[in-house]
Image: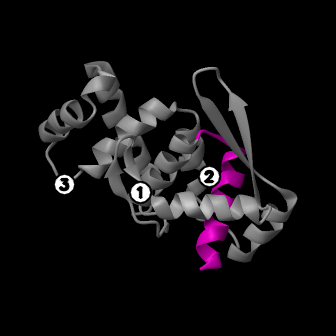
Amino acid sequence: MLEEHAKVVQFVSLAGQVTGRKKLQKMVYIAKKMRFPFQEKYQFHIYGPYSEELTLRVEELCNMGFLTEEKEDKGSYVQYRYAVTAEGTSFSTMLGKQHDKLPEVINMMNDRSARFLELVSTLLYFDELTKEEQIEKVHVVKGKLNFTEDELTDAFEFIAQLATVSIQ
């Protein structure tokens, strides 16, 4: 059980920090879809794939002092920023070395916005559909976000890039 906690700490550590609860959810989901060994169960939610398990795990890690959660008031909403503490760094060493390609995948994702990762994770959630059906599904379940053709093209290209560095 604690191994899964250590994986989350290691993930945040490799990212340096992750800004946003939604972004962390999407990053772990995408890494899981790229066959990295994350065990959290996901279901489709208002912001795309969501894991209650991951939410609880992050809360526990903050309570144990392995992660910090900083809240920043943005006026109309609160932004959360996650980072690893010194204790968290020691804790995550129980895993040993991460997969060689995981840091690259994390950096690729962390450079993107939460909105973009929401689109990517939604497309991946419906990856059993054809590309056209995925696009149609995005327009249905994410209609209010008005994703453009360029954003969809960028998302599919990003998924293809991730696939080249994922676990085969």
The disc, 2 or 3, on the residue closer to the chain's N-terminal end is 2
Marking on residue 128: 3
Q: Is residue 134 visible?
A: yes
Tag count in the figure? Answer: 3
The disc, 1 or 2, on the residue closer to the chain's N-terminal end is 1
Q: Determine whether label 2 and label 3 are within 8 Å by CB.
A: no
Few, some or many C-alpha atoms within 10 Å of disc 3 (few <14, some 14-19, many ≥20)? Answer: few
Image position, residue 86 (x, y; %):
86, 59
Q: Which residue corresponds to the image point at 40% horizontal and 65% vertical from the top-left?
A: 41
| Magenta segment boundaries in residue numbering | 1-20
Would residue 99 appear left or right of 46 to someone viewing this image? right
Marking on residue 103: 2
What is the quadrant of residue 3 in the picture? bottom right
Would residue 36 appear left or right of 9 to someone viewing this image? left
Q: Is residue 147 visible?
A: no
Say which of marks 3 and 1 sits in front. Answer: 3
Does 13 appear in magenta? yes
Marking on residue 34: 1
Placement of the N terminus among the 4 image quadrants: bottom right
Would residue 102 appear left or right of 26 to someone viewing this image? right
Image position, residue 163 (x, y; %):
39, 50
Give the structural element (helix, strand or loop) at label 3.
loop
Say which of marks 2 and 3 sits in front. Answer: 3
Give amino acid for label 2. Pro
Give amino acid for label 1. Met
Give the structural element (helix, strand or loop) at label 1.
loop
How far apart, in angstroms, are the residues tagged by discs 2 and 3? 27 Å
Does 112 appear in magenta? no
How far apart, in angstroms, are the residues tagged by discs 3 and 1? 14 Å
